[in-house]
Image (cartoon, coloured by chain):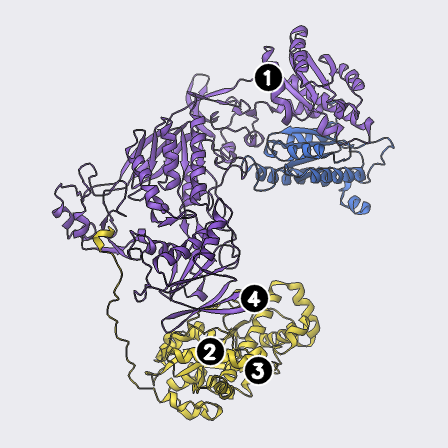
Chain colours: A blue, B yellow, C purple
Amino acid sequence: METELKDKIVSIEKPAIEAPPEWKPMIMGILCNWCSYAGSDLTGTSRIQYPPDIRIIRVPCSSRVDPWFIIKSLQAHADGVLISGCHPGDCHYISGNYYARRRFLVTKKLLNFVGLHEDRVQFSWVSAAEGAKFAQVVAKVSEDIRKMGPLHLYKKENTR
Amino acid sequence: MTKLTYFPGCSAHGTSEEFDSTLKLVMKSFDVQMEEIPDWNCCGATSAHVMTENLAMALPMRNLVLAERLKNKTMGIACASCYSRMKTTKAEIDANPELAQKINSTIVEEGEYHGDVDVKSMLQFFYEDIGLETIQSKVTYPLKGLKVACYYGCLLTRPAAITRFDSPEYPMSMDRIMAALGATPTEFDFKTECCGASFSISDTEIVLSLSGNILEMAQESGAHAIVVACPLCQSNLDMRQPDIDKLAGKKYNTPVLYLTQLMALAFGSPVKDLKPSKHIISIEPALAHIGEEIEIPQKKAKPKKAVAAESEVN
Amino acid sequence: MARVGVFVCFCGANIGDFVDIPAVVEETKKIKDVKYAIEYKYVCSDPGQQMIRDTIVDHRLTSIVVAACSPRMHEKTFRKALSDAGMNPYLLEVANIREHASWVHQKDKEAATEKSCDLIRMAVAKSIANEQLHEISVPVTKRALVIGGGIAGIQAALDIADARIPVTLVEKSPSIGGRMAQLDETFPTLDCSQCILTPRMVDVASHPYIELLPYSEVTELDGYVGNYKAKIKKKASFVNFDTCTGCGTCWQKCPVKVPNEFNMGVDKRKAIYSPFPQAVPNKPVIDAEHCTMLIKGKCGVCAKVCEKGSIDYEMKDEMIEREIGAVVVATGFDLWDPKPYEEYGVGRFKDVITSLEFERMVSANGPTGGVPVRPSDGNVPKNVVFIKCVGSRDEAKGIEYCSKVCCMYTAKHAILLHHKVHDSHAYVFYMDIRAAGKGYEEFVKRAQVETGATYLRGRVSKIYKKGDKLMVIGEDAQIGQVVEVEADMVVLATAIYPYKDNPDLARLLGISYDKYGFLSEAHPKLRPVETAKAGIFLAGCTQAPKDIPDSVAQASATAAKVCALFSGDTMKKDPMIASVNPEFCSGCENCVSVCPYQAIVTEEIPMGHGSEEVRTVSKINEGVCQGCGSCVAICRSMAIDLAGFTDMQIINEIVAI
């Protein structure tokens, strides 16, 4: 698995940086209010545990997410970004998640083009009823990012 | 001259010789040259298709590969079982190239499969490629007066997703061809009912009762004869009729003719070309009806309807 | 200069046990702009809220962050506290340190604490960019449009009108009444459909708050909730309704006969007709497709016999406009065409009929005077086979869903058959009996026990004709055998299916529909009568198969929704919506195409600098915008922003950690 992932990394990110022992990944999670944010609340209510690497921002709909937010997150401090919205067909705003899906396919291509591993940015569908799924998604993203190591490319100093 | 790749199947060279010979006569009238696939093999409709999947597909596939060598657009198949095996296999391997490759690798000698030959039953070929108009134009001896029940059997139009021809429940193609010949197709509800052929050997009782139902309904419809387009249907309904008679306690006396026999007859062939001796139930009495005036059912007096007066309704 | 106050909640032990709250507060105090930070056991409690109110005033705070449970839980509570202290409620941000920290990292207090600090940093950063927002008021036109005059539309119209709100009821056929008018008796009580329906129809016609537009169709709907404008086509009836007395001489004399759609084509009507005796309004219309006068200019009998001179062959379609605030869509259902069931002889055997044809036959005002007869020979049938689920629950030939009413009306038909033909016998082939409802199971039992209907669990595989009988071959799965029933007539319980023009109507109204054409509700459980478009509601079978009680209940629910919408002169609306800055807008109209609510229009504004030229910019209708933010992300000029979730707020959050 590890080698597979490394192989997928395009040249600029290769070799993956040996992470310092105290390093913990930082994942920016941007969730839609109606499905995924509610789902993440349910994860909490159900006391399902997941890695503490994610910081969650609430937006009304996944279609609100501007690729700018993703890029800014990666520039600032995040090692990965997770966007999550309603399942296809279930968007609270009828069709927003379809726009989001198309937009992120393009964004991923761009990020890959500039040398980032495409799995740094992940997209998922989590409904308000899928507390357990949200925990699984975070665990998976966290594991992927841990394998990739800290993101050092394009980091801007003093962005905070 | 059109060329048609011909897959006769085992029965055309045996029990259904009269199908084969009249088919050739009919094709000649249409100016279609039939090219029999050289070295064709069993279609796998025996026990192969229930025993091993690979063999069940390898057998028809070999025929398909051989058929491709003849470079004709269409392969016409005489027997409904062969047709079903060939068509099903083609549908499966066309949809799944990996499977196609796997099966193809067991028959390397014959060459590679490309999938560019159309598989049709003879009925389908007549109906779609020849067309009713052409059929009608060849008729020199109209079968006026002959009432026939068209029996399609279970495989000519089914499964619908694979055959993509006519209706799976109440097909009309053969009926229309019969009408084009001048015969009168009867309203026959058992067109696609099971004749029990799959139990031919293991449980003949079932075959007798199922085939008996078909004969009963054909007689009920007023038909002088049953018309089929499949050797298995023919043999079950014809050969077993004496046994069925015994079981039912009555004589059906309903001959079972091939579609091509009646076509040949209508196109001017003498009755002897139909090989009447091949039939268990004599065909001559049925054919004697040709030329008879068919009484048109009198229009019944308007049924008394328990209809409230119109003004009350409106 | 921002002065942020932060309140960190223990939530009893819920947060306190897993997050080191004093450490969080210490860390929070280090954040620039945070002027005040304090922990409290339950911030949501009355004393907790009082503390917020006092602190706002004492410390002259400019925004507030509460670090507690999910904002989906108590955001409203805390907003109210801000409001009470005289602060704009939208200056609040909630850091979710319970669901997103203490509850999900219970084994790692250090990480949970660190995460809580980060979440608070993000909330503080966001709150600094918060702006004062005010609820939006939208004016409301207090008139409702009800589309469809079946029982659902009638009920909705009456309920709304009883609240003294004007209603325009549009019905496409010449009379209201819909499918229910075609029914004989209704399950599970067997009360006569006409007897309970016609008084309501008369109520509609005479109600001072209802404008009834029969023989009309809605052709356009513009605007937004509270402010719609509908265009309605009044189809030419060629009869002057003002002078017509409904005497009926015209349709008695008319020589043209046409299959009667009200009786499912069992008999004929005339080219000038009123669909049924109790029609409301009871005025005839001329069917332009079949009238020889209108087609060939010959005949004119109806005009000759009309004493009032009400016939006007020159009449044209008329377009009218109505300003309305809300729409109730109640267009009902059609029957699924059972043609694919060739094995049942559909179309070949005259005595294989659909359930609605049977319903018309047993109906007292029906074409056969209330007695079922075989269409082939006019004889009264003795053995009748009813086949349920024809189309319904059949993925191979029909549709996947259950039509919900067939089990019940088939039981009713079995009983009615017995009532009308005493020596008859009913056979019912079924897959399952779905009789959930008040008195429903008892009703099915009644059909089985009292009437003695033979219920056979299994599908019918074939119907064939033997003599003048229909032989029905099916499976009786309970004895595991194939059975054959000799029947005089077969009745197919065909599925409920939406009208094929439902999708057109949905597009016209700007609402969505499912793969079959049923109109979609906003939420299958919690918003079953609303559509995703504010101010448009659904009642009856246009949304999904339903029986009469359910349709009536849903119709009344739409009336409650409409009345709530019209309860004030203006409507209050969440201010978290998008707005365009015309200075930046390049007029590309990308936002127009992504908006799911058609809330964005374009307008022309002057170029400025004294130029006389104009340019096109987008403009968001604040009455319609729901605040999803699609347009914000698509805008390449960054001319659009979403209040409450501005670019600045989100970027602040992102870079805060």
Chain on which label 4 sits: C
Q: Which residue lies furthest to the right in this view?
A: A21
Query: What residue would you read off at disc 3?
Result: B204
- Quadrant (top left/top right/bottom left/bottom right) for the N terminus of chain B: bottom left
Q: Nearer the viewer, mark 1 or mark 4?
A: 4
Marks 3/2: CA distance?
Answer: 15 Å
Marks 4/3: CA distance?
Answer: 25 Å
Tag 3 near tag 1, CB within 8 Å: no
Left or right of residue C100, residue B237 in this image: left
x then y, percent, for residue C572 = 49, 22
x then y, percent, for residue B5 = 53, 78
Residue C526, visible in the rendered structure: yes
Residue type beneath disc 4: Ile
* Residue B269 quadrant: bottom left
User: Could you say which disc has been placed on residue C479 in the image?
Assistant: 4
Q: Nearer the viewer, mark 3 or mark 1?
A: 3
Marks 3/1: CA distance?
Answer: 85 Å
